[in-house]
Amino acid sequence: MSESGAASDATTAVVVDFLPRGSPSDDRPQYEKSPVAYALGEADFRLVEVALADDAGVNIGDRVQIDPPGEAVEARRDVGYGDLTSTAESELEHAIDRIVDADTRRFVDFYNDAQPITTRLHVLNLLPGIGKKLRNNVLDARKREPFESFEDVERRVSGLHNPRAVLVERILEELREEDMKYRIFARRPDE
């Protein structure tokens, strides 16, 4: 997903809500407010609120550069799921889908590279619906040869239906629940 030149080190995010009149929690007079957007980081699934330039022209689903701030972004702060607007909450799954689709190899490789957390717990067991049997089926299949696509995972691992959706569901859980002990994908707002 990196671009050539200096932009390759930039952190980008997908906009999940745009508030042209500023944040409703901002008590300042309207003329002092800047437009804001809520966005989801593409690399670490961090939730952010960004203050935008007045002429930013940002829409839901757009990508914005958040670190270092791009030309549309004036400032950024990390937020939690509870800080999001209802629109941002409803757009999260679409943003996650877009991020996963844009970098499918990264998420297929999760199934190829997942490791044990402790002697009794494997990272695959943190995924919704994956117990001991499915985990062992994934480990056995990837031992024979690495997975090439989500379709390959589904075809070769008996009982694992829609492995892409399983990852999307886990990412959503991590975003919604701030006190999860083990995080695979989403960064906590305070990290």
Image: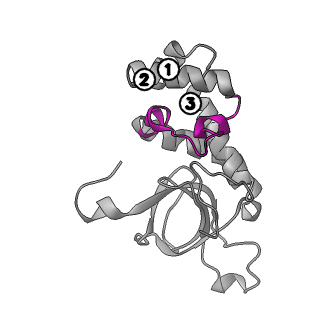
Dot 2 amino acid type: Lys
- Which residue corresponds to the image point at 57% horizontal and 46% vertical from the top-left? 95
Say left or right for 84 vs 5. right
- Which residue corresponds to the image point at 60% horizontal and 65% vertical from the top-left? 48
Marks 2 and 1: in contact by CB < 8 Å? yes
Report the residue marked by disc 2. 143
- Which residue corresponds to the image point at 76% horizontal and 54% vertical from the top-left? 86
- Relative to 136, say whether 62 is above or below: below
Marks 1 and 3: in contact by CB < 8 Å? no
Which is nearer the eye, 39 or 152? 152
- Distance of mark 1 from mark 2, alpha carbons? 5 Å
Nearer-N-terminus badge (3/1): 1
Say left or right for 109 vs 119. left
Few, some or many residues within 10 Å of mark 1 (<14, 14–19, 20+): few
Give the magenta range. Answer: 106-129
Q: Residue furthest left?
A: 5
Q: Quadrant of the C terminus?
A: bottom right
Report the residue marked by disc 1. 140
Dot 3 amino acid type: Arg
Camera-near label (3 vs 2) is 2
Report the residue marked by disc 3. 164
- Distance of mark 3 from mark 2, alpha carbons? 20 Å
